[in-house]
Amino acid sequence: ALQQELDEAIRTGDGLSLDFQPQVNACTGAVIGAELLFRWVRKSGEHVAPEAFIPILEESGQIVTLGKWIIQACCKQLHEWRQLGLDVGKTAINISTVQLSNSNVVEDLLAAMEEYAIPSETMSVELTETALMVSSATLTQNLMQLVENNITITIDDFGTGYCSLTYLKRLDAHYLKIDRSFVAGIGHNETDESIILATIAMAKGLKMDVIAEGIETQEQVDFLTQHQCDILQGYYFGEPMSALMYQQHLFTAK
Ligand code: G
Ligand code: G
Ligand code: NA
Ligand code: MN
């Protein structure tokens, strides 16, 4: 039933939307871009968390059409903002390793960016891992195509996925994103703090920039800034917002 309802939603667009959550420069606090987060509200009014249904769609293959919808809607929105003269920085779109292994998702992204005249330096991909991946030719090809087209790659949820270290070794990723479960331990869990410090040191050694997510407190901001984290994201700076709210946020954040 969930799958049928989503099929219909993708066809009509009803109940589907995109949220934007600001990402800020850790030193200056300036908004440098946003992460795009997909939202689905069912006909019953129930909000379904992406974690709850994306794995199901990956299994059924529906993630391919949903992925196309998200990419189209994102580029259309970015185009509108550009037309208004709004500089929204870099937008990070979540793409799972399942999507990258089973579809032409990068072709879709490049086509939409061309259609809506979105420069590659304003687009980035957060590589999320929802299932154990065996490397496939399609996955490798898709990742290479991103790099060739100057689209930056972030390894998402670092330390919680299945084989992130393998990606670090094989992949030209630009950013490493510290998972919010580690950030939550700052100030009271030495293990989490040690993992964060080791992760930052490793990322710097690999010439990568570090993003931390799930920032909710000043203490977390201070700790991460003191330890050379580059980009911060979390409720402390702004919750995921509708496009309209985000647009207003950009004006008031300046
Ligand atoms: O904002 P929220 O906690 O609901 O997002 C949960 C997770 O859902 C995110 O960490 C992200 O990995 C996943 N997600 C959100 N939007 C998308 C999307 O557009 N595509 C994919 N593949 N995953 C997404
Ligand atoms: O890693 P992922 O792409 O799932 O991260 C995005 C998710 O994290 C979204 O579901 C978003 O709603 C959630 N999120 C964003 N900021 C915060 C925060 O400060 N605290 C918590 N607990 N969750 C957050
Ligand atoms: Na993400
Ligand atoms: Mn994450």
Image (cartoon, rainbow, N blue to C red):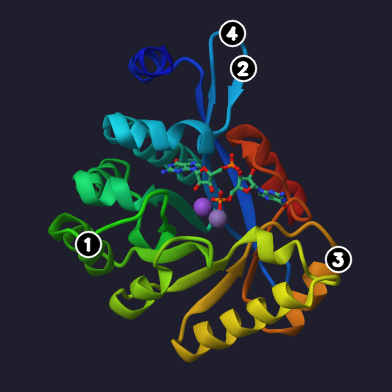
Compute the Cα span from label 2 to label 3. Answer: 33 Å
The spot of residue 145 in percent (x, y) is 21, 62
Under circle 4, the secondary element is loop
Amino acid identity at mark 1: Ser
**SS at badge 3:** helix
> Mark 2 packing: few (<14 Cα in 10 Å), some, or many (20+)?
few
Q: Position of residue 222 (x, y in %)?
A: 81, 75
User: What residue did someone put label 1 on?
Assistant: 135
Residue 236, located in which quarter of the rendered image? Answer: bottom right
Mark 3 vs mark 1, CA separation in Å: 40 Å
> Mark 4 and mark 3: span between their CA atoms?
38 Å
Q: Horizontal placement of 104 versus 176: left or right?
A: left
2 and 4 marks in contact (CB < 8 Å) = yes
Residue beneath the point at 51% across and 45% down: 36
Please name whichever residue, 140 or 237, is drawn nearer the observer in this view of the structure.
140
Q: Residue 189, which numbered label?
A: none
Mark with earlier residue (3, 1): 1
Residue 85 visible? The answer is no
Q: Which residue is mark 2?
A: 46
Residue 31 pos. (x, y %): 65, 60
Q: Looking at the picture, which amino acid does disc 2 mark? A: Glu
Q: Earlier in the sequence, mark 1 or mark 2?
A: 2
Answer yes or no: disc 2 within 8 Å of ligand 1: no
Which residue is the site of mark 4?
44
Closer to the N terminus: mark 4 or mark 3? 4
